[in-house]
Amino acid sequence: MYPGHWSKVFPNKPAVVHASTGESVTYQQLDDRSNQLAQLMWYQGLRKGDHISIFMENNLAFFEVVWAALRSGLYLSTVNQYLTEDEAAYIVDNSDSQVLVSSNQLSAVAAKLPARCPAVKRWFMVDGAVEGYEDYSESISVHPAKNLDEEPAGTFMLYSSGTTGRPKGILKPLPSSLISDDSGVLGGLQKSLWGFDQNTVYLSPAPLYHSAPVGFCTGVQALGGTVIMLPKFNELQALQAIQDHQVTHSQWVPTMFSRMLKIDEAERKVFDLSSLKVAVHAAAPCPREVKQKMLDWWGPIIYEYYAGTEGNGFTHVTPEAWLAKPGTVGQSILGTIHICDEEGNELPNGEPGLVYFELPQLPFSYLNDEGKTKDVQHPEHANWSALGDVGYVDNDGFLYLTDRATFMIISGGVNIYPQEIEDALTMHPKIADIAVFGVPNEEMGEEVKAVVQPAEGIEPSDALAAELMAYVREYVAHYKCPRSIDFEAELPRLPTGKLYKRLLKDRYWGKKNTRIV
C-alpha cells in the first residue's frame, strides 16, 4: 500500500511525529503534499526512470519527497547530511538528478551546490530558501493535490558509504508494479518478519538518509503505521520517546545499544518500555556482551539481520535462536551463502572466508562502473556477490561474521580479526569508543593497535593504557592483544553507527587522509 490508500482509511492519523517538537504529519497531509510535488515534477518533464535527490536532516518534509518519487516511477538518492560541498555535489551530479530538495538547516553546504551540478533543473528548499533555491512550499502549492494519471512505483538509488574513494551508486531495476498495487515490495519484509501493521508505532532514531532507516520508515507508512522520528540519536531521548509514544517497534545499531547500557541502571529503570514488542538491529556486528545485556534488560524481543544496501542477500536471527547460538547473525532468507578463500575456492563449515551470496542473477550494478560491479562478483560465478565481510557458517547454516576483509590484520603470517578485540573492550566502563587495526611492524609485517576514545570524565594516561591492556588479556589470546594503545578525543563514527576506521589507520601507514563518504 501507500499513503494514497491510508489517507482514505484514516486521513487524520499521524504518518510521522517529530519526537522532540511533537509536530506531526497526517496521512492526508502526506498524500496531498507528495501528490503536489509529484505533479510539479511531471510538469517539469520528469518521467519514469529519471532521478532526483534529497539533501536534508531528519525533517518531517523528508517523507513527502520520498513518497513523491516513489509514486512517480523515479529513482531517489538520499544524500548524507554531513557531507562537504564536494562530496554532496559528487552524488547529485553522478546520479544525474534533475531535482534536488534541501533544507535551510543545511544551507551552508546546499547553497554551493547549484554551481556544481548543471544537470539539476529545479532547486527547492524547505523552511526558507536561500539564493539559488525556490521556496519548496510555495512551489508545490500551485500544483493540484491529486494523483498523477498513472503512478508507476519508483525506488531508491542509494550510495554506498564505502571505506575508500568515491561512493558508488547502487542501481536496481525499477519495480514493474504501480505504487497502488499491494505487491509487498514496500513493507513486506517488516510485516512478514516482525509483525509490522497499521497499529505499529515505530521509533526511528537514526539519520533518514541511510538505507535502513529510510527503508523501514517507508515500510511502516506503506502499512499504515506511525513513525516516531528522532532528530538525532540521544540515548535518554530515545528511551523517553518509547515511553511517551508507546512505541511498539524500533531499529538500532550496536553503538546505540552500548550508549544506552552505559546509562546508570537506576536512571534506565525510570522509563516504562513495556509497549516495545520488537527491537531490530543491524548495520554492524553486535558484541556478544552488549547484546546479552540488552536481552537481559529488554527481554527476548531483539531481532537481528545482516544485509547490504545492494540487496544481494539477507540473514535473520530471532532472539531465541541467538541465545542458542550467541554471536550468529542468523540463517539466510535471501540467497545461498558461500564462504570462499581469496582465490574463490569454497571453504568447509567453520572456516572463515569471504561471504558470498548466490542469487539467480545479480540484483544490482554500480552506476556507470562495470569494474566495481565485477569486483564484488565471484571469479567464476557472476551471480555470487560479496560485500567485503569475512565470516563462517556452522553445520546448521548459521552465519557468524568475524570482520571486514579490509581490516583483517596479518601479523607474522597469522590472521587476526580486530572485531574480536573491539568486542572484548567495548563495554569497559572507561571506554566510550574503540577502534582496532593493524599498523606497520618491521619484523611481523603488522602489529595490533588500539585507539580509544575515553569515557566522559576519564583522562587518557599511561596508567589507563596499562589497565586496558591488562583487561583485554583476560579475554583474548596474548598474540591478538594490542601492542600499544593511543587515545583520541573522538573517533570518526557517523550517526549511522558506522566507524570509518580507514581515517585512523591511514595515519599510521603514512597515507594522506581522505575524508570518507
Image (spheres, rainbow, N blue to C red):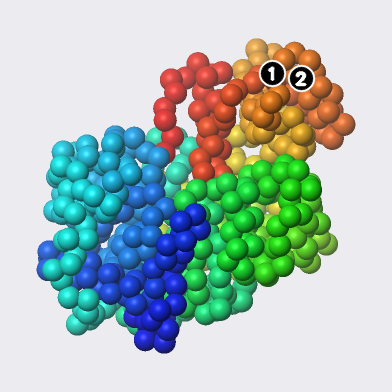
Work out whether residue 34 or residue 503 is closer to the camera in this orientation and state it: 34
Which residue is disc 1 drawn over? 460
Quadrant for the C terminus in the image = top left
Secondary structure of the residue carrying tag 1 is loop
Place of residue 269 in the rendered image (x, y in percent of width and height, measured from the top left): 76, 54
Q: Quadrant of residue 342?
A: top right
Q: Which mark is residue 341?
A: none
**Which residue is at 50% across, 16% downward?**
510
Residue 136 versus residue 419 in the image, above or below? below
Q: CA distance from mark 1 to mark 2?
A: 6 Å
**Which residue is at 66% across, 19% downward?**
486
Badge 2 amino acid:
Leu
Quadrant for the N terminus in the image = bottom left
Label 1 packing within 10 angstroms: few (<14), some (14-19), many (20+): some
Describe residue 282's horizontal placement relative to residue 157 as left or right: right
Residue 58 versus residue 431 in the image, above or below? below
Place of residue 327 in the rendered image (x, y in percent of width and height, measured from the top left): 75, 52
**Which residue is at 68% across, 30% downward?**
455
Which residue is disc 2 drawn over? 464
Place of residue 513 in the rendered image (x, y in percent of width and height, measured from the top left): 44, 23
Question: Tags 1 and 2 in contact by the CB under 8 Å rule?
Answer: yes
Label 2 packing within 10 angstroms: few (<14), some (14-19), many (20+): some
